[in-house]
Amino acid sequence: MFKNFSSYLLIIALLSGLYFPTFFADPISNSIYYPKPLLGGLGFGFFLVGIFTFRNLLGKLKPLILFSLGLLFTTIYNLNLPPFLEAGQRIQLEGWVYDSKEENNSTLLLVKEKELGRKILVILPRKNLLVGKNLAISGKTIMPSARFFRLIKSEGLRGVVLADSWQELGKSYFYFIFWLREKTINKIANLLPEPEASLAAGTLVGKEAIFDKNLKMQINKVGLSHIVAVSGYNFIIISNIVVALLKEFFGYLPSLFLSLPFILFYASLAGFSGAVKRAFIFVLLIILGKIQFRNPPALYLLLVCLLFAGILNPFMFLSDFSFLLSALATLGILSLGSWLKEKLQSSLPIPQFFVKTIAETFSASLFVAPITTFLFGQKFFLGLLINLLVVPLVPMIMLFTSLALLISLLLPHFASLGTFIAFPLPRLLLKIITIANQF
Amino acid sequence: MSKKLFFIFVLALWLLILGFGLKISAESDWQDKVVFCDVGEGDGILITSKKQKSIVIDGGPDNSILFCLGKNLPWSERRIDLLVISHPDSDHTRGAIEVLKRYKVLKILFSGALSDTQIFQELLTALEEEVKEGALIEEAVLGKTFDLENLKISVLLPKESFWQKKPNRDHQAMVVVLLKINNSLALFSGDLEKPEAEELVSNSQLPKVSLLKVPHHGSKNSLATNFYQALSPQIAVISVGKNNRYNHPHKEVLEYLTHQNIKLFRTDIQGTINCLPVNFSWHCQAEGDKF
């Protein structure tokens, strides 16, 4: 069924590209731009085809040609992004809110513009606007202050608008997912005290943690910042759970295929931020590769993933430390990790799960050590030891927080039962962090 | 598959037992104390009692108070018996809204005075939600008292009702409450300013209190010497943010308190301050210092 999967992917990419209008005008600068979605769709399509027809990096020319074409299209896509909006213009835009942050007396909204697809930072007086809604906004473009520079680069924003009026135009297609994310986070906050609630929400849906500075520093110092963010590890956990539940009914490969909508749903629930998108693309490529009855060369996949992310937003390499950390950790796991796993398996009489954890944690920690030591003053061996203790807790925290949520939703009168189940592991994690910081 | 399910079931059961065990041990965490949470530039105070009752007075400017509650309330406690909102300024109310969202608040005490601010609208929305969940809203006016076992709260200000009225001055409808815990008294003065403080002294028989939350983060406008003389506190706590843009607390207030030999605690320097009632007085210490 999946033998000609790459051809299907190409057709889907082309059709999705052609679906979008062929050109459009920017109402602000009156310039005509190339159809980005079409180019983007084509570029991504060629990337996928390149990957799935790839067998030997030096052996065959065809995938390289396709890959180069993908690179070319995506570069054109990137070059044709509308310029950053100049300060002082009056602007009216329609778009949907894909992220929001409350800051003192303002609300910062990340809005994806409906017409041009630009991502714009909109600043409003503090307002409880649920993410996922469509808005009509009128305001003035401003020169962004220095505190927004990192956000502008990591999100690829095209302007900052100070809104003076706005109107809700209803819900976007994604509203339900954002509503569910908000509900999940609120429910966890109702079940658990702080900081356990933030820790559980961060582990489950990658909610930006609201820890106080001291705790944030402690978490970074022992190399556990990855615990409170959604990474490829979370997607693999979701995929493994779905496969474990379904494989007896449908078999391994169809179950793997059926896990795709679940991880897509989970990615949406996790907010689809830059880091989540990268992790999602990488895991998607691995799963699609497995479905092809092939073990895709993982290092090559990582390279493609990095290239793709980097081409879409080159600033990531320079400004987004989490991007660098996740790339280095993955590189460590794929290169040193696999070798170490084999060596340990043959020499140590311990269960496979522990061998895997030790090998992967050691190699990921080793590869990120230069950056974490420089940035957070992290002690390598301490970080390694703590990660070995904590990494196995992550899937359990995810599982039991979900279980607690389920109990509180289905049996609201027994919600405190959920608290008892969900509380001990995040508390244990915090204890480990506190003790580790004493060394 | 069945092995995995069995493992998950056993683990869930183990966690449940562990949770109950932790809850039983957490119940012994209840103690008679007042915690001045380090919430930055604002007020956020938690009062707890051995009888498992809790009162929160204001919530500070952000969600920092949640960490203070997480640390000082038993972990399984998701209920607050009384929330006092001194006035709807954002440095007192923003965190209180977070408390309303996260905890089941049984009673809310506030003046009901109207305000045009955005934060006031947000507070009303949060209050409406809490009322739907069964909370009772009580108007804060002189004479109102709350008896929570060994915790007794009496409202000293405002003297007249401001319910659904707009005050003439910003802090005119300030809610000032007196706490009696066992035999120790403490006064929580919110952002009380000189005119209201003097009015309070002239119109009522103020009791001597041993612990005072210094009004308005120690601002110059809050310094009413006869107010301090009437109360004659032994300990004063200033809830204030580090390097705040208002330069709180004011030099004159600090000099006055030093001159009066009042032992001073500051959240900007010492962080969260814990006060335990001891023989008609209080023993206060910075968090982390052992009593």
Image (cartoon, rainbow, N blue to C red):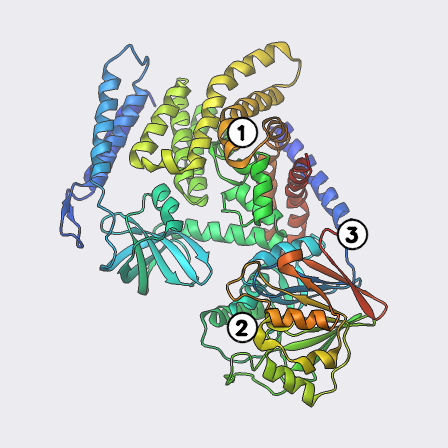
Decide which of A171, B117 is in the foreground and name it: B117
Does A221 sit left or right of A72 as displayed? right
Question: Three-letter amino acid code at disc 2?
Answer: Pro
Tell me the chain of label 2: B
Element at label 1 = helix
Kind of residue at disc 3? Lys
Residue at the image point whose x is 70% and y is 84% from the top: B143
Circle 1: is it few (<14), some (14-19), or many (20+) Cα within 10 Å? some
Q: Examine the rendered structure and indicate whether residue A210 appears above or below residue A278.
A: below
Above-or-below relation of B115 to A428:
below
- Residue indicated by mark 2: B88
Q: Is residue A413 visible?
A: no
* Comes first in the chain, label 3 or label 2: 2
Mark 1 chain: A
Residue at the disc numbered 1:
A244
**Disc 3, SS:** loop
Residue B1 place in picture, x, y as percent: 59, 28
* Residue B172 relative to residue A252: left or right: right
Residues at marks 3 and 2, CA–CA distance in whole angstroms: 35 Å
